[in-house]
Amino acid sequence: MRYFVLFLMTFAQLSFAGMTAMFVIFSAAGVVNNNEISEFQDLIFTLSFIVIPLSSIIVALTVLYFAWKKSAKRSYWLHLLPVLLTVIYCLYIIQFY
């Protein structure tokens, strides 16, 4: 049962990485098409495209590592990190609309 849940959570994190990558691409494109943005804002969009999906991949690998070290229960809270980064990005995007 433990490995099945671990597999589902890892699959969910990797799926979330792809979903957030597409979300950042389309939301940034929508903002750029409708607004004049500075170089700093462009840098934020570029880094968001890299950091948010990468955080999901890093969390999935970290949870797998902790499961291998037999301390996975302490690492389950890490699954919230990419969600928190996505919420912060959404709050940043809202200021353009």
Image (cartoon, rainbow, N blue to C red):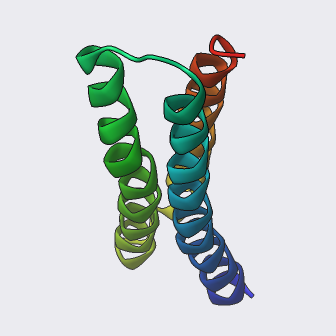
Where 30 falls versus 63 (above or below)? above
Where 6 falls versus 36 (above or below)? below
Residue 7, position in %: x, y? Answer: 61, 84
On the image, which quarter does residue 9 sit in?
bottom right
Q: Which residue is drawn at 53% across and 46% down?
A: 24
Residue toward you, 89 or 36: 36
Residue 20, position in %: x, y? Answer: 57, 55
- Give the mark count: 0
Residue 71, position in %: x, y? Answer: 45, 62
Residue toward you, 70 or 4: 4
Q: Residue at x 35, y 45 (%)?
A: 51
Q: In the visual, does 38 lie left or right of 57?
A: left
Q: In the visual, does 7 lie left or right of 68?
A: right
On the image, which quarter does residue 90 sit in?
top right
Q: In which quarter of the image is the N terminus?
A: bottom right
Q: Residue at x 63, y 15 (%)?
A: 96
Residue toward you, 55 or 93: 93
Where 21 falls versus 81 (above or below)? below
Q: In which quarter of the image is the C terminus?
A: top right
Residue toward you, 8 or 50: 50
Q: Which residue is drawn at 62% across and 63% down?
A: 19
On the image, which quarter does residue 68 sit in?
bottom left
